[in-house]
Image (cartoon, rainbow, N blue to C red):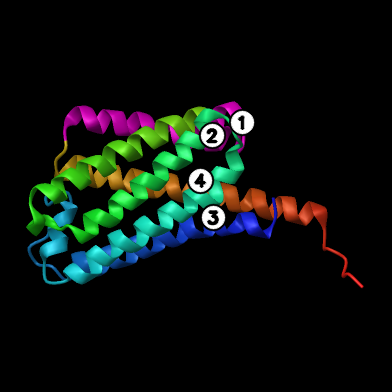
């Protein structure tokens, strides 16, 4: 792994940072929003809707890049190794559409939101298997993905409400942070072992 492999996890960390910052801007400026009591998407039609919807669209695009530029080359060519990043990239595209089709859009918003969460959960399940099979991010990477997947299943059993939705997003943020840091550390460690590339004449 070299410098080219660092771009994927950097996109992952940027997705988390941009979503967190823009979400906090929207949430702190919307007097009608209460943490864990309102759906996150309520911010998308609030006074600072531009910030929240931008958070969804920007982070969704970065998630797709994280998956395609980071996870895809990391995991190899087996079916689960290809399917996991593909599902996560689709989840990123669906998240972009959640930001485009806000609650004012009615059924379209609900459909994209449910599709995003279910696709993300499926991606976590497949990625857990792929990470275990390849050992690409060690035991920590596998445990982080397995924990996020199992917790996601528990939240799905509870049902989609403001509480479970918010916890699902927080879980995804933690998983993305851990996975991105592990990938970035691995890429930089591999580059350091190779040493500097001698100049060509």
Q: Quadrant of residue 140?
A: top right
Nearest to N terminus: mark 4 or mark 2: 2
Residue at x-position 7% and y-position 51%: 106
Q: Which residue is mark 2?
A: 81
Q: Which residues are magenta?
A: 130-159
| Spot occupied by residue 104 in the image (x, y as percentages of width and height) | 8, 59
Q: Which residue is mark 3?
A: 8
| Spot occupied by residue 94 in the image (x, y as percentages of width and height) | 29, 49
Give the secondary structure at mark 4. Answer: helix
The answer to whether marks 1 and 2 mark residues whose Cβ atoms lie closer than 8 Å is yes
Rounded to the nearest angstrom, the CA distance separating label 1 from label 4 is 15 Å
Q: Which mark is residue 134?
A: 1
The answer to whether marks 3 and 2 mark residues whose Cβ atoms lie closer than 8 Å is no
The answer to whether marks 4 and 3 mark residues whose Cβ atoms lie closer than 8 Å is no
Rounded to the nearest angstrom, the CA distance separating label 3 from label 2 is 16 Å
Q: Residues within 10 Å of mark 1 (few under 14, many from 20)?
A: some
């Amino acid at each position: 792994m070299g410098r080219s492999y660092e771009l994927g996890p950097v996109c992952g960390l940027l997705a988390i940072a941009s979503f967190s910052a823009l979400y906090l801007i929207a949430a702190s400026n919307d007097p009608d929003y209460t943490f864990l009591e309102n759906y996150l998407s309520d911010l998308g039609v609030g006074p600072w809707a531009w910030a929240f919807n931008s958070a969804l669209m920007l982070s969704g695009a970065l998630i797709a890049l994280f998956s395609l530029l980071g996870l895809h080359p990391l995991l190899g060519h087996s079916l689960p190794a290809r399917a996991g990043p593909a599902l996560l990239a689709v989840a990123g595209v669906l998240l972009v559409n959640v930001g485009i089709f806000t609650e004012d859009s009615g059924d379209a918003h609900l459909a994209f939101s449910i599709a995003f969460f279910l696709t993300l959960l499926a991606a976590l399940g497949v990625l857990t298997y792929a990470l275990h099979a390849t050992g690409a991010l060690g035991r920590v990477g596998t445990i982080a993905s397995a924990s996020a997947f199992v917790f996601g299943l528990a939240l799905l059993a509870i049902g989609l409400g403001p509480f479970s939705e918010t916890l699902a997003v927080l879980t995804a943020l933690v998983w993305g942070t851990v996975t991105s840091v592990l990938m970035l550390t691995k890429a930089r460690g591999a580059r350091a072992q190779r040493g500097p590339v001698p100049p060509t004449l």
